[in-house]
Amino acid sequence: MGSQSFRSDQQAEELLRNACTLADCANPVPQPVVSRTYDKSITRRGVVWLGQTCNLRCQFCYFIDRVGNANHPEHPFMSLEKAKKICLTLVEQYGNTAVDLQGGEPTLFPSIFELIDYCNRIGLAPTLITNALLLDNSDICLRYRDAGVRDYLISVQGLGDVHDGLVGCPGAHRRQMTAIGNLRRVGSPFRFNVVMSKPAVPQLPDIARLAISTGALVVNFITFNPFADQSGAGHRCSDNVPRYSEVRPFLTEAIDLLEEAGIETNVRYFPFCMVEERHRKNIYNFQQLSYDPHEWDFASWGWTGLEPQRRKEGFLSPPLPLVVNRLAVRNKGRLKQVAESIPLIKPVLYRGHQLLSSLVSLFPTDRDRLYREVARVHAQLHCGYRYGEHCRACHIRLICDGFHGDYATLFGTGEAKPVLNEEKPQSPLHYIIGSQSSLVSSQPADNRLSF
């Protein structure tokens, strides 16, 4: 179905109207004070996984097996004290100034308000990555605002029955739109995350229109990739994973709508050649992620992503500098496996970390080069990204990850359209620098902190 036919469909128009009505789009609301920056420094945002407990069962959830298994060690929420220790480490060891709090669903975390307050007290501006179901209560939204939530990243996976079907909960879309209306009225800023699953793809332009009407600050379009639990058998197939060429016309229209409205737009894990040239600045694959202030710092992400930092039980593993994380990544987690299988080795690793950190600090490091190397390792070793026959001739191959290995197994790489007859860029910022701006808070406390 083409974009034009979908847009003119009466049912689709009604879905968008109903969503805007629920979100109270007709009424003016307080606007967050923001400005724009073209600065593309390495991100200082971290992430904390509080536990894989959730009130939805999203088909594309990276942790779908853990969410559905109450006996999985990462399923139950950790204690408030453990979450605080992780947050303090993000500040003291990794220099993070913002954090994404997520689950599962962080609004279910019993001590979420105390954790939000703590994050603000230690200089870590908190964002909630949420499905927003529990925010359909206006009093709760006021309480979150007063507790100090910097903003919300809301998972908008479609409109109407498409959203409800994808997240496995009838009425979820209606509750989410009501929640967005509540956030608008109390003046809390929010952004959208949109997974480009096959049922949602025809709705991308209307999701863009919803973002414009509600005042979303940023929209992230995320490719449905087989990270974490999605890499197992039975989750991904041609019925729920769209071809890149199927996504392209709807994504093109959506980005054009958002950019015309001045809304920051990012596309995750999508080959450069599968978007229009004017949209290459919006592509954030592994090599570009570190320069998106809304994304996570590879150094702290590498640490919080280890199992001890994701489980309810047990101690935290020692924080490691990025140069050591790189070695662990290259060895596919063997260091982590050794530490977890032999508990007595943890004090040795901690002492080793202290010594190694001291040694590393004595030598200058090309930070950008190190982050880029880690990005390549993630793409090639963890995700099996590969280049197709057409990619070999592409002039921008050095800054593109190529096609995810799982996608290539499903569909091949024949869709690749090599970019020719232009300079061969060396920097992952080639299309971004000076072309794509990011929104930052203009609040006096930190006028450089991005949403």
Image (cartoon, rainbow, N blue to C red):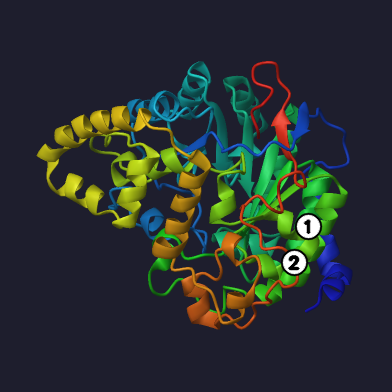
Closer to the observer: label 2 or label 1? Answer: 2
Residue pictured at 17% horizontal, 49% vertical: 338
Q: Is residue 404 above or below residue 208?
A: below
Q: Secondary structure at mark 2?
A: loop
- Which three-letter amino acid code belongs to the residue tagged 1? Ile
Using a 10 Å C-alpha cutoff, classify the residue at mark 1 as few (fewer than 14 neighbours), some (14 to 19) or many (20 or more). Answer: many
The answer to whether residue 402 is seen in the rendering is yes
Residue pictured at 63% horizontal, 45% vertical: 154
Using a 10 Å C-alpha cutoff, classify the residue at mark 2 as few (fewer than 14 neighbours), some (14 to 19) or many (20 or more). Answer: few
Depth order, front residue of 2/439: 439
Depth order, front residue of 223/150: 223
> Label 1, on which residue?
255
**Quarter occupied by residue 83:** top left
Q: Is residue 25 above or below residue 84?
A: below
The answer to whether residue 310 is seen in the rendering is no
Q: Is residue 403 left or right of residue 208?
A: left
Depth order, front residue of 441/425: 425
Residue pictured at 64% horizontal, 28% vertical: 449
- Which three-letter amino acid code belongs to the residue tagged 2? Glu
| Quadrant housing the C terminus | top right
Q: Percent from the top left, x then y, of residue 424?
A: 66, 63
Which is nearer the N-term, disc 2 or disc 1? 1
Q: Percent from the top left, x then y, of residue 372?
A: 50, 50
> Label 2, on which residue?
422
As measured in the structure, the alpha-carbon distance from the residue carrying label 2 to the one carrying label 1 is 24 Å
Residue pictured at 83% horizontal, 46% vertical: 213
Q: Percent from the top left, x then y, of residue 346?
A: 17, 37
Q: Percent from the top left, x then y, of residue 191?
A: 68, 43
Q: Is residue 200 left or right of residue 300?
A: right
